[in-house]
Image (cartoon, rainbow, N blue to C red):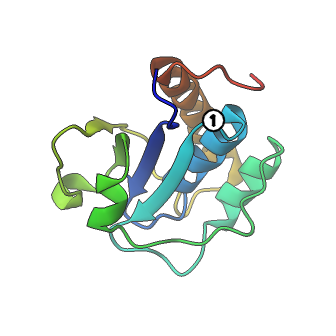
């Protein structure tokens, strides 16, 4: 087994909701065993405050995070790239694994609508950890 830790990049259009929640879960649940990135094809000004609130309920603080622009370097440096509704914007590199997670967009939604999206993301992140062979630190 390699000494380098696996890396994952979560991409959505605005990098303000789904990708930030997924990155927050992966950082938290991997305990640092996975290098985590997130980005957007058209980054927003700030993270969706309802997504931040939903993650705080899980003990994960996204308040210091900010939307980042998607770069080819970030894609190339990642073992797994998970897209969430950004279409064909993501560059393709040989040897990189790509997944598309069809998830509802939390933009403009209240906390009651965002919680199920958050919970679905958590389940998918736990499955990704299992595929990467990383034991979650908390489940």
Q: Is residue 42 above or below residue 99?
A: below
* Residue at far bottom of view: 45
Q: Position of residue 24 (x, y in %)?
A: 65, 48
Q: Nearer the viewer, residue 61 or 78?
A: 78
Is 133 left, or right, of 60 in this rendering? left
Residue at the spot 68% in from the left edge and 41% down from the top edge: 32
**Of helix, strand and loop, which one carries label 1?**
loop
Q: Is residue 55 visible?
A: yes
- For residue 72, what is the image quadrant? bottom left
Identify the residue at image location x=57%, y=39%.
34
Crowding at dot 1, Cα within 10 Å, few <14 / some 14-19 / many 20+, comes out as some
Instruction: Give the quarter of the figure containing the C terminus.
Output: top right
Query: Relative to 54, does residue 49 appear above or below in the rendering?
Result: below
Closest to the observer, 130 or 40? 130
Residue 33 image point, x, y percent: 63, 35
- Give above or below for 118 relative to 123: below
Q: Residue at x 54, y 81 (%)?
A: 45
Residue beneath the point at 55% across and 36% down: 121
Image location (x, y in percent) of residue 84? 37, 47
Decide if residue 104 is in sight here: no
* Of 81 and 16, the residue lying toward us: 81
Image coordinates for residue 137, horizontal then vertical, percent: 75, 26
Q: Which residue is mark 1?
A: 33
């Amino acid at each position: 087994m390699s000494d380098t830790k696996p890396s994952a990049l979560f991409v959505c259009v605005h990098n303000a909701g789904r990708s930030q929640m997924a990155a927050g879960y992966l950082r938290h649940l991997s305990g640092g065993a996975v290098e985590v990135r997130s980005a957007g094809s058209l980054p927003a000004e700030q993270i969706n405050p309802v997504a931040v609130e939903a993650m705080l309920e899980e003990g994960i603080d996204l308040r210091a995070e900010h939307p980042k622009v998607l770069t080819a370097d970030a894609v190339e440096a990642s073992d797994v790239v998970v897209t969430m509704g950004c279409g064909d914007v993501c560059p393709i590199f040989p040897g990189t694994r790509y997944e598309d997670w069809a998830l509802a967009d939390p933009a403009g939604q209240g906390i009651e609508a965002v919680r199920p999206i958050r919970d679905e993301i958590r389940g998918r992140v736990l499955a990704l950890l299992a595929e990467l062979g990383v034991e979650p630190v908390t489940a």
